[in-house]
Image: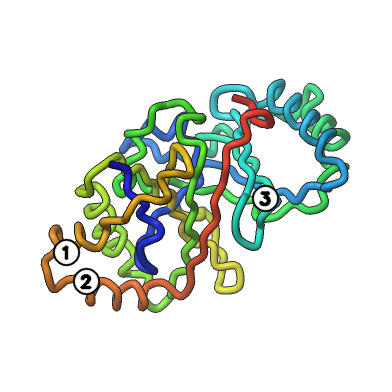
């Protein structure tokens, strides 16, 4: 039975920013990366923006490393904004990204006039070892809801991040049910003001799954010992200065898929 991990505690680090259609390709020799941009649409022009973005993505970002996937942010302070994501890719794919042949002009003339603001142009690399996205079906629409948790790392305790993530990963993989999650790192320095250092993601088939009871703590105690929980919480408090959540919903109409 699918468990609602994220409603459990301050402690759980599940992240993601990823395209489920290709995240199943976990390859230890190649680190998958995604480019993501947060866009604030002009709410008075949503219809034409939607039509133009769909045409743009269908023409220039339909397949391969340059495939675009679009999500609507439905919770948190960024509600109403959209995520435009390209990938998975490697840096070399950015050298061949669409630019000439009308791409840049189409984005300039048919997308940007209907966007109020662009934020967080980022590249996120996946922690393949601590993720289990190989369990994804390979079809984006099968898991259209993503629970994103952003983490701000304490610089003085950053050396403990991997240990923390390994403990969480081992616990989630031992839980009953189909608990799919990914761990991702921001490729560039964010400092303490921006703080978007790590992102974790849990993938959901529908909203009903959020009603299911979490079993993270019980499983953690079974995996790491009956007296391990308090130490885990203390470690989380030291390693992470801050965290916050967003829920994204896949927008098939706007995507290149």
Q: Residues within 10 Å of mark 1 (few under 14, many from 20)?
A: some
Quadrant where the image shows the C terminus: top right
Percent position of residue 227, x then y: 13, 73
Residue 180 x/y as whole percent = 35, 42
Q: Secondary structure at mark 1?
A: helix
Indicate which disc residue 38 carries.
Answer: 3
Image height of 178 relative to 22, above or below:
below
172 sits to left or right of 117 = left
Q: Position of residue 79 (x, y in %)?
A: 66, 55
Check disc 3: other Cα within 10 Å, few if <14, some if 14-19, many if 20+.
many
Q: Is residue 131 above or below residue 241?
A: above
Q: Label 1, on which residue?
A: 221
Where is the N terminus found, in terms of image quarters? top left
| Residue annotated with mark 2 | 229
Label 2 element class: helix
Residue at horizontal 43 percent and vertical 41 percent from the top: 204
> Are the residues at dot 1 and dot 2 in contact (C-beta closer than 8 Å)?
yes
Rounded to the nearest whole Å, what is the CA distance between mark 3 and mark 1? 38 Å
Is residue 78 positioned above or below 86 on the image?
below
Asked whether 212 or 131 is in front, the reply is 212
3 vs 2, front mark: 2
Determine contact: label 3, label 2, CB under 8 Å: no
> Where does residue 214 sit, x and y in percent of width and height?
31, 56
Spatial CA distance of label 3 from label 2 is: 36 Å
């Amino acid at each position: 039975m699918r468990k609602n991990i994220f409603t459990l505690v301050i402690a759980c680090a599940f992240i993601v920013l990823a395209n489920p259609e290709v995240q199943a390709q976990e390859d230890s020799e190649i680190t998958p990366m995604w480019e993501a941009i947060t866009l604030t649409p002009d709410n008075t022009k949503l219809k034409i923006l939607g039509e133009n973005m769909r045409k743009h993505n269908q023409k220039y970002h339909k397949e391969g490393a340059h495939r675009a996937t679009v999500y609507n942010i439905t919770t948190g302070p960024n509600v109403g904004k959209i995520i435009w994501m390209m990938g998975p890719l490697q840096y070399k794919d950015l050298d061949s990204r669409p630019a000439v042949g009308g791409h840049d002009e189409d984005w300039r003339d048919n997308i940007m006039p209907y966007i109020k603001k662009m934020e967080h142009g980022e590249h996120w690399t996946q922690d393949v070892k601590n993720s289990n996205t190989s369990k994804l079906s390979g079809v984006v629409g099968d898991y259209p809801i993503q629970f994103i948790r952003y983490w701000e790392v304490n610089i003085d305790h950053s050396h403990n991040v991997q240990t923390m993530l390994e403990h969480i990963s081992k616990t989630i993989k031992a839980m009953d049910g189909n608990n799919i999650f990914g761990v991702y790192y921001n490729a560039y320095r964010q400092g303490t003001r921006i703080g978007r250092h790590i992102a974790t993601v849990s993938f959901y088939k529908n909203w009903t799954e959020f009603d299911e009871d979490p079993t993270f703590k019980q499983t953690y105690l079974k995996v790491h010992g009956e007296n391990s929980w308090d130490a885990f919480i203390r470690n989380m408090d030291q390693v992470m200065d801050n965290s916050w959540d967003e829920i994204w919903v896949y927008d098939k109409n706007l995507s290149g898929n």
